[in-house]
Image (spheres, rainbow, N blue to C red):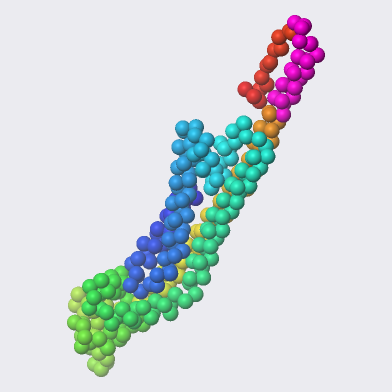
Amino acid sequence: MVGFLLISIGSTVKAIYSDFEEFMADHYYSASNLAIAIGISYFFVALFGCIGAIKESVCLVNTCAMANNNNSHSFPAQIPERDLRGYSSDTLFSLLCILVLEISVSIAAYVMRGNVEETIERNMRQSMNEYNNIYTQYTWNATQYNLRCCGVDGPTDWNEFAEEYNLTFVLGNDNETEYYIPETCCTNENCESEENIYQFGCVNRITYIVSECALLLAVGALCVSFIQLLGVTFSHLLARSIRRLKTQIVVARMERRQHIYEQLAKSGNNEKVAPVLYTPTSSEA
């Protein structure tokens, strides 16, 4: 479940960012990519645990336990108590490493919100100079159409490219203001007046979307970390109970064996030894 949540959050944020890839910096994808990578790793670890439980494979179950703390399936009776302590420490250390990575995702996503607007505005103005490029043109048209905006700060941003690109001319209501805009800046196909032009720039709307997605990723990773921390705590307590129970069983078995050996020693080598009846306890059964 933890892995699925991380993959879902990371994939959703990355898909939204990809719509504005032309205006985004590469490092904006690092937090979502890391969340997806952690989620995939968790998924395969859980898969190993399920297969190991079904096949009763100690190796696979132990592999799962190293990252998922599945101690209830990971302590064969023949492992000494001192080995169990070291094993639990390694398991807990692995869990803490993953928790640190998840918290790092949360911090990186939150810090990224600081300079989003400046970076996006700079990239948007730079991409306006490459509007003849098919991919850039598609990104701009899709952004303006879907977000109902025009230009970076407003429709007049396109005026400086009036001679360079094939833009639509619209005369303002004051008969003085001129607009040279792409068709996607118009509210309808008949872009004949200023009322038919989107007056809001796209930079503020893109910044809002990117910032909210980063906040979603930060909060989501933090919540997943909290859930996992609870799981680590309860699993560790369960592991201690299991170790204590297994230790009691081993000690009781050794005491019974010692008692049998003492009876045999007292009887002597030449005497006829009465058979010793061994009855397993309910805990051993």
Is residue 229 in sight in this rendering? no
Q: Is residue 177 above or below residue 263?
A: below
Where does residue 256 sit, x and y in percent of width and height?
Answer: 73, 21
Q: Over which residues does the magenta segment extend?
A: 251-272
The quarter holding residue 265 reads: top right
The quarter holding residue 261 reads: top right
Where does residue 134 sit, x and y in percent of width and height?
Answer: 22, 73
Q: Is residue 221 left or right of residue 155?
A: right
Where does residue 1 sit, x and y in percent of width and height?
Answer: 48, 47
Magenta-drawn stretch, dominant element (helix, strand or loop): helix
Q: Is residue 45 left or right of residue 189?
A: right
Residue 252 part of the magenta-drawn span: yes
| Residue at image coords 48%, 49% | 42
What residue occupies the far right of the structure in this picture? 266
Q: Quadrant of the C terminus?
A: top right
The quarter holding residue 65 reads: top right
